[in-house]
Amino acid sequence: MLTQQNFSIPADDDAYVSFLVDESVVDITTLQGSQIWWNVYPMQFACPVPDEPAVIAKTSQSGDIIIPESPALSFFVQIYEADTIGLLRNYYHEARVLNAQQQLVTVAVGVMTVLPTEGRPI
């Protein structure tokens, strides 16, 4: 089952977002050896806006996505302060995994809300 994951983060803060992958979606028992992509897109009607580029893009190859060494099917995305500057609203996000068996699977989708903070820099 594809994981629907909605979450909120404060603008201009560093954050880790955790994802737990349903074993039945990827048909594996570990994410070790997998490549992961996580992208955030402008959203309209709960879907990404066609032909709009990602406003945030992270990969396991870049080190922005951490895959723990445990057998759990989980990973963490590092979001930096600079990623959310000027992003105050809802966005569509999705995570895709290319596992060691070369299967490309979308494992999570949802809404990421970037919230204003009182201490925003001027």
Image (spheres, rainbow, N blue to C red):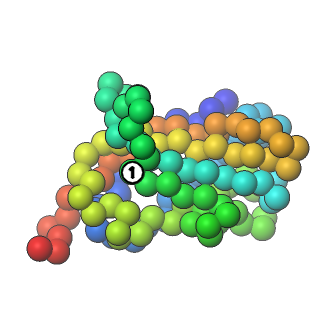
User: In this rendering, does residue 92 appear at all?
Assistant: yes
Q: Residue furthest right?
A: 101
Check the image and report above or below for 59 versus 96: below
**What residue is pinned by disc 1?**
55
Residue 53 as seen in the image, left or right of residue 24:
left
Compared with residue 74, is residue 61 higher up or lower down, i.e. above or below? below
Q: Find residue 89 and report its horizontal and vertical position in percent.
A: 25, 46
Q: Residue at x 43, y 54 (%)?
A: 56
Observer able to see residue 48? no
- Give x and y (percent) for residue 92: 41, 39
Q: Relative to residue 28, is residue 59 drawn left or right?
A: left
Image coords of residue 94 (percent x, y): 53, 42
Q: Amino acid at mark 1?
A: Val
The residue under the point 17% across, 70% down is 120
| Extreme residue in the left direction | 122
The front one of 120 and 40 is 40
Q: Secondary structure at mark 1?
A: loop
Taking the view exactly as shown, the residue that stands out farthest to the front is 51
Left or right, 62 with reference to 12: right
Q: Is residue 64 above or below residue 45?
A: below
**Residue plotted at (62% across, 67% down):** 62
Q: Residue at x 35, y 70 (%)?
A: 81
State left or right for residue 64 relative to residue 91.
right
Tell me where residue 85 sits by quadrant: bottom left
Q: Quadrant of residue 34?
A: bottom right
Residue 31: where, in percent of width, then height?
77, 54
Q: Tally the numbered discs.
A: 1
Q: How many other residues sit within 10 Å of disc 1, few (<14), some (14-19) or many (≥20)?
A: some
Q: Quadrant of the C terminus?
A: bottom left
Position of the N terminus, as image quadrant, is top right
